[in-house]
Image (cartoon, coloured by chain):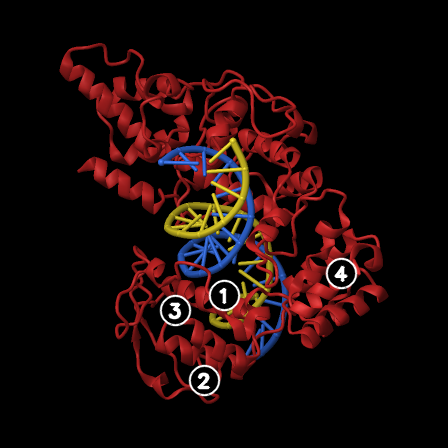
Chain colours: A red, B yellow, C blue
DNA sequence: TGCAAAACGTCTCGTAGAGC
DNA sequence: GCTCTACGAGACGTTTTGCA
């Protein structure tokens, strides 16, 4: 059961939303007091509301009546004022109401972590000693709370079901509270009034000294701990990193099952793994993932301390190819499936099909790139939009120069040639749209991808960044 | 049963710190 | 200075839930 927010809570949230679609810290603090919701819940509500309003059918003009769309409870005085919302969603500035300056979302975001002294616990979704007592008591009764119990816990602790679930999940990993939750740690947590107790789970219980602190979110800034302490606690071991890196080389978008599997394999909490993959993708996209090629080239086998092996020469693997924009209608992309054994052995790349031939065939047939066929080409070749365009541009260029247009053309990583041809000279941004596309089991995946991706190709569109770069290149 | 709200999972992106 | 890593924030699409 997911308890809905009460009318009063919604009214307050909506009233606040009316004033500003991006709640300030002060406003959130106020809402937290009034609504008894956590900061995360409030922010989530704002985020979802912005999103939903943009996507709603008549999102250009949103009117919150008193008490909201359904209920007629009291509401703020500003509630009768229509709000014009730009639903273009092209920039993060759109959700801002007219009376607020068009500040970019990223600019509104604090540059650094901003302490929130009065609401530290909520801010970090950390649990108070009282909450922990309730949770512990419940856990002692049953390690797997019923829905009823969850609801009760939620009511009592004011935590979200997700948080409670996560706590139980982590708590179950701990053999016993006494052994896993050292007094010193508990004392610290309690005296700090932080959720260190919450983090007692793997970090304190695991023999892996670097095992991080899980509990749903990976981010736990613990007052009383130095940043170094925190980083040390959350730092992954070389072995764990190796497992993750091997998995990353295989696929940059693991399935949920694979995340689970990796979590088991590495002993890391799942959220950490998900985050790590996200970070790695971002680094990869920006060309900052130096270890990637070492792993991909097979130069790293069973390493025991960071990346090693022979450098360079590897092909990037396709994870989620063609750039998966935020606006993409998101089915789960086709992802590789592999056994857990694969995680450790970083299987060597194998030869895969080339998208070059597809492009060549297309070119021979049409002699130019028809924009309408771009999606299809991207799908078939496992190349990015940019790469396809690049390929055609190169053909044209070579034709203009009177050279053989098909000799060693850049087909990107779809056929593994890009590394040696364009890849070495391409900028990270040039590579960003199709991380590691094509390669090894893409031989197989490519076939499957074609089918599945084609299904979603109707709704897929390149990410904003891709679109942007494309439009630039078009210019 | 259909709709709307809420929850959920995962994404990208920017940034800071640690280590080399 | 560079690379890697961790973290915070918000966006987005899907699923679940509650209610008329």
Chain to which the residue tagged by mark 4 belongs: A
Task: Tell me the residue at 63%/69% (across/down).
Answer: A2
Q: Nearer the viewer, residue A246 or A161?
A: A246
- Residue A468 visible somewhere in the drawing: yes
Chain to which the residue tagged by mark 2 belongs: A
From the viewer's perspective, is the residue at label 1 or at label 4 nearer? 4
| Total numbered circles | 4
User: Which residue is denoted by mark 1 in the rendering?
Assistant: A44
Q: Position of residue A132 (x, y in %)?
A: 73, 68
Q: Are marks 3 and 4 in contact (CB under 8 Å)?
A: no
Q: Dot 3 surroundings within 10 Å: few (below 14), some, or many (20 or more)?
A: many
Q: Is residue A381 above or below residue B1?
A: above
Local secondary structure at mark 3: loop
User: Which residue is denoted by mark 4 in the rendering?
Assistant: A184
Task: Tell me the residue at 55%/54% (across/down).
Answer: A227
Report how far apart the C-alphas of labels 2 and 1 lie in the structure: 20 Å
Q: Are marks 2 and 3 in contact (CB under 8 Å)?
A: no
Q: Is residue A244 above or below residue A92?
A: above
In which quadrant is the N terminus of chain A drawn?
Answer: bottom right
From the viewer's perspective, is the residue at label 2 or at label 1 nearer? 1
Q: Position of residue A85 (x, y in %)?
A: 30, 69
**Marks 2 and 3, the one that precedes in the sequence:** 3
The label on residue A67 is 2
Local secondary structure at mark 4: helix
Query: Are the residues flagged by discs 1 and 4 from a single subunit?
Result: yes
């Amino acid at each position: 059961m997911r308890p809905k927010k009460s009318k009063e809570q919604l009214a307050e949230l909506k009233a606040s939303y009316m004033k500003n679609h991006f709640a300030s810290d002060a406003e959130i603090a106020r809402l937290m007091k009034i609504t008894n919701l956590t900061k995360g819940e409030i922010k989530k509500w704002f985020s979802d509301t912005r999103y939903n309003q943009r996507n709603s059918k008549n999102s250009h003009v949103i009117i919150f009546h008193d008490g909201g769309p359904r209920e007629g409870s009291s509401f703020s005085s500003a509630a009768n004022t229509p709000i014009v919302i730009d639903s273009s969603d092209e920039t993060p500035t759109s959700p801002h109401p007219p009376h607020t300056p068009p500040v970019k979302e990223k600019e509104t975001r604090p540059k650094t972590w901003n302490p929130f002294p009065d609401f530290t616990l909520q801010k970090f979704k950390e649990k108070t000693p009282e909450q922990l007592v309730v949770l512990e008591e419940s856990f002692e009764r049953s390690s797997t709370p019923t829905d009823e119990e969850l609801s009760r816990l939620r009511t009592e602790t004011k935590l979200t079901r997700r948080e409670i679930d996560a706590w139980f999940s982590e708590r179950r990993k701990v053999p016993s509270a006494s052994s896993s939750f050292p007094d010193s740690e508990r004392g610290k947590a309690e005296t700090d009034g932080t959720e260190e107790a919450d983090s007692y789970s793997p970090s304190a219980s695991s023999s892996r000294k670097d095992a991080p602190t899980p509990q749903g979110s990976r981010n736990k800034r613990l007052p009383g701990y130095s940043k170094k302490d925190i980083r040390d606690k959350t730092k992954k071991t070389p072995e764990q990193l190796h497992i993750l890196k091997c998995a990353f080389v295989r696929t940059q978008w693991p399935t949920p099952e694979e995340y689970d599997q990796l979590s088991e394999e590495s002993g890391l909490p799942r959220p950490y793994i998900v985050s790590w993959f996200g970070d790695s993708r971002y680094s990869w996209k920006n060309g900052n993932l130096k270890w990637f090629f070492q792993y991909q080239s097979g130069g790293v086998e069973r390493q025991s301390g960071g990346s090693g092996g022979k450098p360079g020469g590897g092909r990037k693997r396709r994870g989620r190819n063609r750039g998966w924009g935020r606006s993409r209608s998101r089915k789960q992309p086709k992802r590789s499936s592999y056994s857990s054994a694969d995680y450790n052995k970083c299987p060597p790349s194998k030869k895969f099909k080339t998208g070059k031939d597809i492009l060549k065939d297309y070119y021979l047939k049409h002699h130019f790139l028809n924009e309408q066929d771009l999606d299809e080409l991207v799908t078939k070749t496992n190349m990015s939009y940019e790469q396809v365009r690049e390929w055609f541009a190169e053909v044209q260029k070579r034709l203009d120069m009177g050279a053989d247009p098909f000799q060693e053309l850049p087909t990107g990583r779809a056929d593994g040639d890009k590394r040696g041809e364009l890849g070495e000279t391409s900028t990270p941004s040039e590579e960003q749209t199709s991380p590691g596309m094509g390669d090894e089991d893409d031989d197989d995946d490519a076939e499957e991808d074609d089918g599945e991706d084609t299904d979603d190709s109707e709704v897929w569109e390149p990410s904003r960044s891709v679109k942007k770069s494309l439009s630039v290149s078009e210019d």
